[in-house]
Image (cartoon, coloured by chain):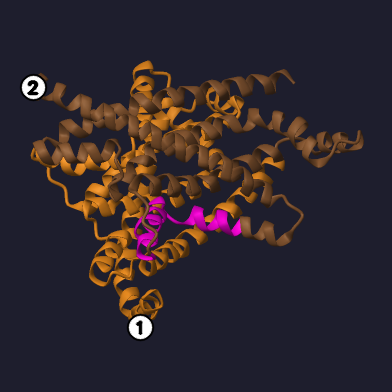
Amino acid sequence: MTMSLFLEWMPLLLEAAVHTLKLAVLAYLLAAVAGLFVALGEMSRSATLRRCCRVYIELIRGTPTLTLLFLTYFGLASVNIVLPGFAAAVLALGLHYAAYMAETYRAGIAAVDRGQYDAARAIGMTGAATMRRIILPQSVRVILPPMTNSAISVLKDTSVASLIAAPELMLRANDLASQYYMPMQLYLITGAMYFVMAYPLSLCVRWFEYRAGRGQHRV
Amino acid sequence: MTSDAWSRALALLPDLLAALLTGVWMTITVTVGAFFVSLALGLVFAACRTSSSRVLHAITYVYVELFRAVPVLTQLFIIYFGLAAIGIRFNPVPAAILGFGLNGGAYLTEVFRSGILAIHRGQTEAAMSLGMPRLMTLRVIVLPQASRIVLPSLANFAIGLLKETSLASAVAAPELSFQAKLLVDKTFLTTQIYILVAMLYLCMSLPLSQLARILERRAARGRRA
């Protein structure tokens, strides 16, 4: 591989990496919001709503991202709802990770002692206020490491969107690899680029876990 | 048009299922193969990670961080397309087993490491003071106790692996998702076939998640006792 080829590829790959980041951020935001609703639904008083949320989580966790991606992209197209690849990828990844986020939120809320909840209710706080001011702030410490792990997973899973031709890093790498027939060089560079994006997040997880561990010891 | 597609799918159902079931077997083959590769790599690297050698530590750290920060699809393409371009040719199925195995090994290294660290230091010290060699301590004292802790994680890992093998369709390994793609190209029954595929994946993963739940309960009971 000559330097000139490398210089030719890099602007194209970097541009695609920006798309990858955009895709990851949008899918992650969708997952974080939708996951919160699913988690709250799972704890609601209505048994039907609880069951629906449970079924959603089990369905999503039992099927590959790829299947959901194909259903949103090709499946919706066959009933005349044609989404661009990028939008379909945001939707599929967001809905997929919402189920994982819901589990994370639930674990975080369950980690707060019930006495905290009872005490808040005893001094007359409403259910919503208890959640917002007592439970959620304490849960954050527990859910931060798994939430960052999900961010890493979403970032890596955006590569799957290349299989529905959504414009992102892996698709650009595939295009260049077949154009120049240098798959080894291109996929290694691409791998390094994903590493540069994901490794800082992985360091964050370590730091959060270290912080959370320290908090536990102090108590 | 749409209701027509559903009735056509219903009429074709036996043929579709027969074709997809051959894919199911291949999915199971790839999953089981990659699981054992991951298990072996995870055990070896976890032993390295908990050893006192700084070189082994560094190698394990690099392995785990590299493989966990790069998408498995990229790793798979490096093994299948990348190695082929420099003359090392794999068939799709061995390439998939190797790719998912290498990737899974990095995850299991961390799982085993936390399992080993969860065992009280006094256990290791007691074994050492009895004169047991390090590897024997690991094998006879630490791993049997750690196994109860890591079993639920192993079951959850197997579920993740099972779903991940769908990516092997991108290198034309004839597993479930690949068979689905072939059928879709032939019949154009996209929605119907992918819903069927989702159900087949569920049939494989739900027993595993049931198993994970049982193992979690058992591990929790062991901790209390």
| Residue B27 sits above or below residue B132 on the image | below
Q: Amino acid at mark 1?
A: Ala
Q: Is residue A78 magenta?
A: yes
Stretch in magenta: A54-79
Dividing the image into 4 quarters, which one contains the C terminus of chain B? Answer: top right
Residue matched to label 1: B11
Q: Amino acid at mark 2?
A: Thr
Number of the label disc, if any, that sits on residue A17: none
- Chain A appears in which tint? brown
How far apart in space, not on screen, are marks 2 and 1 (Cα)?
57 Å
| Residue B81 sits above or below residue A136 on the image | below
- 10 Å crowding of disc 2: few (<14), some (14-19), many (20+): few
Residue A141 point in image, percent of width and height: 64, 27
Res. B51 image quadrant = top left
Picture residue at 79% right of the left edge, 36% below the top: A130
Picture residue at 49% right of the left edge, 34% below the top: A149
